[in-house]
Image: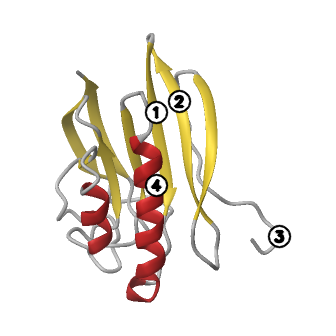
Amino acid sequence: MEGGDYGNAVLARHPIGSSHVYPLPGSGEPRSLLQTNINVNGSPFAFFVTHLAAWGRLLRVARLRQVSELGDIIARGQFPHVLCGDFNVPPGAEEINALLAHGHLRTCGEPTEATFPMTRQRLDYIMCDPRWEFVASEVIRRGPSDHWPFLVELKLR
């Protein structure tokens, strides 16, 4: 965009076996879902990251289409999976409810804890399938971004 590269990225201390970028529907700034298959001590899992369309109600229909697509992609996977990203909507939004209605994801951490200081709302999420045990979470209230980092500790069951 505007002469530069941007997108989703994953940094991992364990080997990334493979990765794939899935384009998501919508016009304007292109959105995608990045899948990386990571192997931790012989246990593979799928780690997904995305950044959905912004602008609140204006792009709600685009986000709903994006959520539908990424929910279907993630559900097809065979490995335990984690999804994280900037969903650009607060808890209880139709987009979050539609994604959770797929039945294979649950949110991690306290949904009322803000990750976007400007509006004091949660817009960033980490979700996992039932093969993960949620241990702890923390919003780190500092950093160079307009969003605060959200850290979650999970344990594979």
Q: Amino acid at mark 2?
A: Asn
The residue that disc 4 covers is 70
Taking the image as drawn, is residue 102 in sight?
yes
Marks 2 and 1: CB-CB under 8 Å?
yes
- As rendered, which of 140 and 101 lies closer to the eye? 101
**Which residue corresponds to mark 3?**
3
Name the quadrant of the N terminus.
bottom right
Disc 2 target residue: 37
Comparing labels 3 and 2, the label whose residue is closer to the camera: 2
Residue projecting furthest to the bottom: 58
Query: Sequence-wise, which precedes: disc 2 or disc 1?
Result: 2
Figure quadrant of the C terminus:
top left
Residue 101's place in the image compared with 134, above or below, is: below
- Which SS class for mark 1? strand
Disc on the earlier residue, 4 or 1:
1
Q: Residue at x 49, y 49 (%)?
A: 49
- Pick the residue in front: 39 or 153: 39
Which label sits on residue 143?
none
Is the residue marked by circle 3 packed among few (<14), some (14-19), or many (20+) residues within 10 Å? few
- Quick one: SS at disc 4? helix
Instruction: Residue under label 1, please give it.
Output: 46
Q: Nearer the viewer, mark 3 or mark 4?
A: 4
Note whether 147 is above or below 11 in the view shown. Answer: below
Q: CA distance from mark 4 to mark 1?
A: 13 Å
From where the camera sits, is residue 12 visible? Answer: no
Is 103 situated left or right of 38 in this image? left
User: How many C-alpha atoms fall within 10 Å of the one at disc 1: few (<14), some, or many (≥20)?
Assistant: many
